[in-house]
Image (spheres, grey):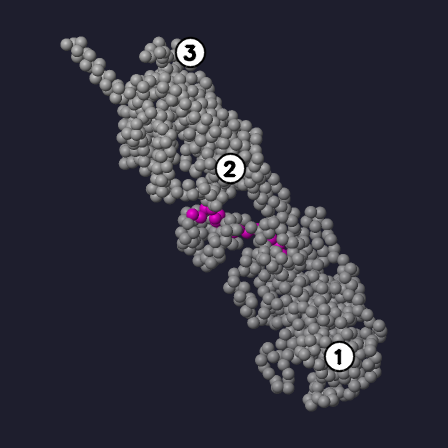
Amino acid sequence: MSEFIGDSQRHYNGISSVLKIDAKIFIAILLITFLGLVTIYSSSSGDLSLVIKQATRIVIGIFTMIFIAQVHPDNLRLFAPFLYFITFVLLVAVLFFGVGNTADRWLDLFFFRFQPSELMKIFVPLMVAYYYSNKPLPPKSAYLLIASLIVLVPVLMIMKQPDLGTALLIGMSGAIAILLAGISLKFFLASSLTIILLAPVLWMNMHDYQKQRVLTFFNPESDPMGAGYHLLQSKIALGSGGFFGKGLFNGTQSKLGFVPEHSTDFIFTAFGEEFGFLGVLLLLSLYLFIALRGLSISVKATDNFGRILSGTLSLTLFLYVIVNVGMVIGFLPVVGAPLPFMSYGGTSMVTLFATVGIIMSIKSHQRILRK
Amino acid sequence: MKTKARKDNIRKRNKIEEKYSWDRMNDADEERRSHSKRAIIASIIVLAIFTTYVFKLYQVQVSDYEYYAIKSESNRIRIRPVQALRGNIYDRNGQILAKNVSTFDLIIKKERIKNDDVFLNTVNTVLPKNKIDLVSIKEQLTNRKIKEVTLIPNINLEEYSIISVDKHLLPEMELSPKAKREYLHPFSTSHILGYLGKVSDSDIYSDVVKIQEGMTEIGKLGVERFYQNILSGESGYEKLETDALGEIIRTIETKDPRRGDDIYLTIDIDLQNYIYTLMENKEGSVIVMNPNNGEVLALVSAPGYDINLFTKSISSKNYNKLLNDPRKPMINRAINGQYPPGSTLKPFIGLIALEEGIVDSKKLVSCTGAYLLNNHKRPFKCWKKEGHGSTDLSYALTQSCDVFFYRIAELTGIDIISDKINKYGFGQKTYIDLYNESKGLVPDRDWKYKIKQQPWFPGETLNVGIGQGYFLVTPLQLTLATSTLATAGKTYTPHLLKQIRDSKTDRMDVYDYQDNKFITNYPNLDYLDIVHHAMWRVTNERGVGTASQMKKIRNIEIAGKTGTAQVYSLDKGKTDIKNLQDHALFISYAPFENPKIVVTVIVEHGGGGSSTAAPIARDVIEFYVNTKEELFSKNE
């Protein structure tokens, strides 16, 4: 039998151990947010107000992260069903009382507006981890069905909003959670096949603009001034950046409006244009580092809940990067997903820091177990 | 009891644990190992994706850098040509004939039009209907090359102030400054200056005009066409940085256009206008040329047309009106009107006969009012039914006796006539500085056979002898031929260009007429004198000369020759239909002793040369002498 010998944090020294955060991940994130601020400053042609707003969000995010890092994973597990359920209710509310122009995904709570789907990015993996935490692993197919429902129901609702990008991201993070929980490969392949078979159903339920995006993805050059325009201009911006980049404030493609959303979804393009391949390599390496360190934290976690949750969240973070960068380099369709810690925007910045806070909490509250 | 219950409890729990295999399945180490394995697989996948992405980015940013860099440049850089201001056109005395005035077009940028139909509706209600051309606006809307739609070209500020009352309905309208060509004497100079028009495909494939980037208007006719490359200057350009919407962010580089050079014509606009007023209600042409240097002082083709209409694309309605005008104002009669020369050809026929030894000054031909040719049933009539009696060459020219010339033409023969007559410039272009000049026609046996598939008939030679039949001349050819008489064969190619003023240095580049001599060989000047004298008699020998009834011009003597070209055979009886009336012609030079100007007058269906054409020439010469008094008094 295992024996509890004490919290691992005792072995840490310095401020990071006091704050229960992981200094290495934190520094990597700070670097990324800094690069993000620089890019926003440059591509907005020196608009400090945007930088200040974004910096404010980062600060709020950091506080959120530190706060969540203090929360013991056991408490997280305790509240997981409750948090999931509340957000689920909010999602329903959005469907009926949402605000926003084309895609009604915002909920106006008088004092602030936010997207419940953004919260689901955390709570779906949390709920899956919770669900599997007291089940014997590898899980039985019955558990898989319930876990799948935990993932699919909110995903379908978010798709209905319609926010295909977020829905797919959440769906994939749910899949990662289930995979990490220990589903057999055989089963995974079977379900993948099912999803592929279900693709036509998905297609028929998609909005025209979503279909257009997917079609454009497969043949972007077909309509260079139409739907494929974004992708083409994005590639031109990246490519013209070259090895060393055009230099700060010289990103003509992004600055002159050829690259759309140069501060939000296409910030990677704007960054790549000014900082070149070298900058892009550094940035991707930072993300890689965070993902791998997160995975190593999950390996060291003491229980299934911690392992599944930290592993899933780390991989999800990297997944966001893959989706966003894949979109701007033409690997994936333009779905509208922000680049973690870089894209200009409120809710996603805070949820991302919260995600990292959870990973840090799992790391800091590891119990050293010995046989 | 307590112990038993506890034992039961343990057994129950063990059963449950056994059922769910807690021991085996929930083993911490087992789970940890399982998770580690999956985490490692996940790490490998993450690394693989990372590598793929980095590889792809390397491709885009390093391998294909050149390709994308060029695309990026062409994305943001726009080269906007800046048209050069066109050179002005002046007359010989520096009076302005064509200039540029700045005007405004009422335009709307296309990107600001959201819905074409709504836009057209608004345009229709807001703008005055008589000012807009909806068809043209629609055309501009559909033409993808055009960035802006011109609603009202050349709008004046008064019109704009009226429209601007309703500007809130069409707020995207703006005034765009344009340089507009303005002709100060649009009717009288129409055939000399020509006009400007939009660059068309035929211009692009033309060898004579240079098309520059951004050029929208080009000389279509006249001097505007012939000196297009000089007048147009050189376009400059602006290298602009634009954003994705095409809005200009900044100018990177500019090259100023080079203003077109000014052109000074040999035309005397006062004389030109005076002649035009004389000719305004007639159809025909008057040319005044200095035979001593080839300078064309006036070149009138009547009627003229308003070349200002063509500035900023003439409406199709106006254009069709001009094209279908029965008076045919768009034909430049001076170089494209081809007329039978009538009796104005006689001096040249006479000279050929003299030079060929067919006649001499004393040889007489008896004129009985008609000439009979073998095998011809109908006699060839003289204009004077009662006949001229015995006439020598001089008298025949003075009286314009037809029979005399029938006779000498018959004796000379068509082969010699058609061969020798070329030296006066007939049957070929004069090479004046205007395009599309007509050649006229000198008929000969080959031509007759080729065109009509018929042999040459002797009677046709007789007709040529009096300038009728197939023989055709342009007024300008006639002017050049007269000049060779006036200068004893040492005249110059007619030209309109006097000098060019370089727009940069203001230096005058004077046209060198000496380079363009038109030499006619007169082997015996005595023969020429016979003709000269006869032409003097035409205007001066009272009661004998066909144009001697004219009032004298102080001390200036004119030499000339009348001509009446038949359009309709008189055999069929007299007619009053205007289009069947004879053409009236007159060639002349003055002063007789030292010719300074050659004047040619052709009035279509004007009747007799002596009654209609000669008085016009006389007035023209008088006007010229009066206004250029110093010129004539100095040399006298």
Chain of residue at mark 2? A
| Callout 1 crowding tier (Cα within 10 Å): few <14, some 14–19, many ≥20 | many
Q: CA distance from mark 3 to mark 2?
A: 45 Å
Residue under pointer 3: A12
Residue B414 disc label: 1
Task: Give the x, y percent position of residue B565.
Answer: 67, 78
Magenta span: chief secondary structure: strand
| Kind of residue sitting beneath label 2 | Lys
Which of the pair B282/A107 is nearer the observer? A107
Q: CA distance from mark 2 to mark 1?
A: 81 Å
The mark nearer the N terminus, 3 or 2, is 3
Q: CA distance from mark 3 to mark 1?
A: 125 Å
| Callout 2 crowding tier (Cα within 10 Å): few <14, some 14–19, many ≥20 | many
Q: In which image quadrant can residue B571 be found? A: bottom right
Per the image, is B29 magenta?
no
Instruction: Please check whether the numbered discs 3 and 2 fall on a single chain.
Output: yes
| Kind of residue sitting beneath label 3 | Tyr
Could you tell me which secondary element the residue under label 3 belongs to? loop
